[in-house]
Image (cartoon, rainbow, N blue to C red):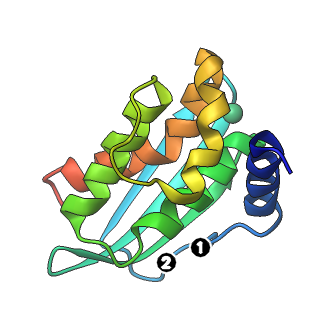
Amino acid sequence: MSLEDLYRETILDHNQSPRNRHELQNPTKTVGLLNPTCGDQIKLDLQLDHGKVTDVGFSGHGCSISMASASMMTEAIKGKSVDEALQLVRRFKAFLTGTPSAEPLGDLEALQGVSQFPSRVKCATLAHNALEKALTDGASD
Ligand code: ZN
């Protein structure tokens, strides 16, 4: 299996069996974002406790890249500290614009090919931008 095939399989897997695709009962933070270029919509719910992401869920709809990326991201940040989650978002966004990540990004690396298509980068970063907004927005609602 070539690396490209492996990446395709990984994206397909997250589309067919999305991780954490559900709403949380009492989220600490909720952020909704839209990617008008493609029509992707996402709502991200976070449960935060003592500086940790104890639970995360997403809902919405969109293209396979946006949904797979959301699934991969939620899986990657669950149980991490807020700082670690923010670092992951920033590493991933840099990775998509051609900066190699110093640390492994797990399944998210399967989205590497997206970096060649600037319009699709917005699909791949939608959930990450929602996360960044949720974690850096000081106001709690
Ligand atoms: Zn999209």
Asked if the residue at label 1 sits under 8 Å from ligand 1, the reply is no
Residue position for label 1: 20
Q: Can residue 57 be seen in this view?
A: yes
Left/right of residue 120 with respect to residue 141 in the rendered view: right
Amino acid type at image mark 1 = Asn
**Does 101 appear above or below 88?**
above
Left/right of residue 125 with respect to residue 15 in the rendered view: left
**Does 72 appear above or below 63?**
below
Q: How crowded is mark 1: few (under 14 residues within 10 Å), some or many (20 or more)?
A: some
Q: Nearer the viewer, residue 32 or 13?
A: 13
Residue displayed at 31% across by 72% down:
80
Amino acid type at image mark 2 = Leu
Q: Quadrant of residue 51?
A: bottom left
Q: Quadrant of ligand 1?
A: top right
Q: Residue 24: which disc?
A: 2
Q: What element carries label 2?
A: loop
Q: Residue 44: which disc?
A: none
